[in-house]
Amino acid sequence: MDAQLEAILTDLEQKFGASQSEFRGQAKLLVAPQHILAAAKALRDQHGFEMLAALSAVDYWPERKPRFHAVYEFKSLAKNLRLEVRVPLDGDDPELESITSVYPNADWHERELWDMFGLRIQNHPDLRRILMPADWTGHPLRKDYPLGYEEVQFSFNFEEIEARKPRPKE
Amino acid sequence: MSSLEQIEITTEELRHLVSPRAIEGDTILLNMGPQHPSTHGVLRLLLELDGEIVVSCIPDIGYLHTGIEKSIESKSYEKSEVMTDRLDYLNTMGNNLAYCLAVEKLVDLDVPERAQAVRVIFAELQRIASHMVWLGTHMLDLGAMSVFFYTFTQRERILDLMEMAGGQRMMTTYFRPGGLWRDVPDGWVEGVRELIDDLPRHFKEFEALISKNPIFLDRTKDIGILSAEDGLAWGVTGSSLRGSGVDYDIRKAEPYSGYERYEFDVPLATEGDVYARYWVRMKELYESVRIVRQALDKLPSGPFRSNNRKFVPPPRAELGESMEAVIHHFKLWTEGFPAPKNSVYLPVESPRGELGVLLEGDGGPKPYRCYWRTPSFVNLQVLPMLSKGHYVADLVAIIGSIDIVLGDTDR
């Protein structure tokens, strides 16, 4: 691993009690949810990670502790480094602090987290659904959300399936 | 017209997004899209207008949401790839490339040199094809009809080469984990060479048509200025960021698929306006041609796909002779190959910016999670900031200049 990245990881480990791991040469850092805003600030202001490259989540259902991982991909252009920060979140209805005050582009990413995973983002300026329609129920990328499909219609059950097909509301 | 009740979204949800003047009826709220020719697909914008000036702009996306990330979780690694073409339909090969590289990194699979070089050639041809669509539609938005026909003629020639190799014009799925679906056919190398010898002449023609056109200059200079700081803070990548003077190209910063072997420059402009972004993309066309030429000259012979039979199915001819081959064929096409319980994030430079794939395995044959960090999604976020204070007509120019593809945005 890069020596510069090593120093950054050690610093964050000491400050936030984070734990690091590595896979295929990519560094990962596990940070507790209460520290994410401070960690993001430290990454941007002290360690030169100018950009939040990506933000998403993974659902580990039926696991409960943690059920989710919020995954942040930080990028430093000046040092040419990448760092993945993972935030474990317990329970079915977890809360996560917004980092829009540090990285403004987290805005839509966090709306997507709410829309797709149902993570309640705290202190977000505009938390609405982003990809699904506003009146949608459920969070599609959760593992306990079923994958939809289209029923095959044959001549004997054509009418029956036609009648229960979902249609847009008037 | 300005009363909020006439807009279909709930009023309370929007109140904080528009200025107080909209509530008083001082400014007009206007719906633009999702069926609007200049929004490049199904982008919906809610505009707050003071006369013709944009006071605030609220993008509403999701009209092309296809749930591909969810569907990928239910298919094996190799079968999922077919869906990746459909994300950014102007960068199909680039999506395949990002996905294959992520799978290869996750399972630690090697790719032969020849496959890497062909991948680079196709990725660059795809970049040219994508820029051709961008240029044509961007000019169409600005009222220059004929450019569209010229650029689409050139794009067609690239699609023919893709059809030649992959059998499809757009949704090729030609790259596969471990290499290519099949080797490039006879006559393909000559076809590419003929094309790249001819293309720069056409690029010069486009530049002669557009670059100094006074109407074009009026419409693009000092419009939608993105500063380098804002660009970085908002995570803008690709040509849109390089138009603001930030030297960031993943092909240079974190080379993949052998990009470190080719010599090319990264065009930069400092103004950050619509014209700067146009200029950068035009210069990139020549660089892509340069890369393709080098890759063609050095095109190595040898296998086009890894022969690691745990991940790559054996060729058909082997099946009649080898029992091993039959077993591998059966295992790979019924179950697929397993990947370790861990994740990789793999960024590549798509024509629009950083295209990243976060791929997580769970030890089984299906991806546990496949997240697509799409450049259009992130770049579109700056639209409200760029369009503030400009005319509606300029808004159209700004949308064109950040080069979004809605399939890429909505996934």
Image (cartoon, coloured by chain):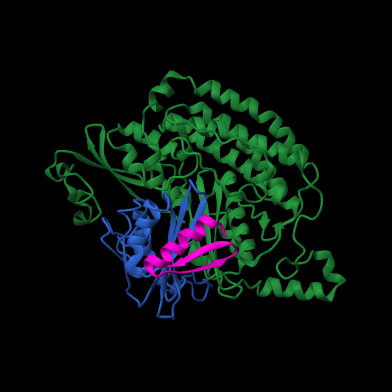
Chain colours: A blue, B green
Span highlighted in magenta in the image: A1-30
Quadrant where the N terminus of chain B sits is top left
Q: Is residue B308 above or below residue B194?
A: below
| Quarter where residue B328 is shown | bottom right
Badge count: 0
Q: Position of residue A13 (x, y in %)?
A: 43, 67
Which residue of the protein is positioned furthest toward the left in this rendering?
A: B24
Q: Is residue A37 above or below residue B286?
A: below
Q: Looking at the image, which is closer to me, B261 or B151?
A: B261
| Quarter where residue B204 is shown | top right
User: Residue B95 vs residue A104: left or right?
Assistant: right
**Residue A133 visible at all:** no
Q: Looking at the image, which is closer to me, A69 or A10?
A: A10
Q: Is residue B278 above or below residue A53?
A: above
User: Residue A33 vs residue B159: left or right?
Assistant: left
Which residue of the protein is positioned furthest toward the right in this rendering?
A: B321
**Residue B78 visible at all:** yes
**Residue, x 67% and y 58% (percent of image)?**
B176
User: Residue B65 vs residue B342: left or right?
Assistant: left
Residue A137 within the segment the image draws in magenta = no
Q: Position of residue B215 (x, y in %)?
A: 41, 21
Q: Position of residue B68 (x, y in %)?
A: 50, 61
Q: Looking at the image, which is closer to me, A74 or B159?
A: A74
**Residue, x 88% and y 71% (percent of image)?**
B321
Q: Position of residue A152 (x, y in %)?
A: 52, 71
Residue A9 within the segment the image draws in magenta = yes
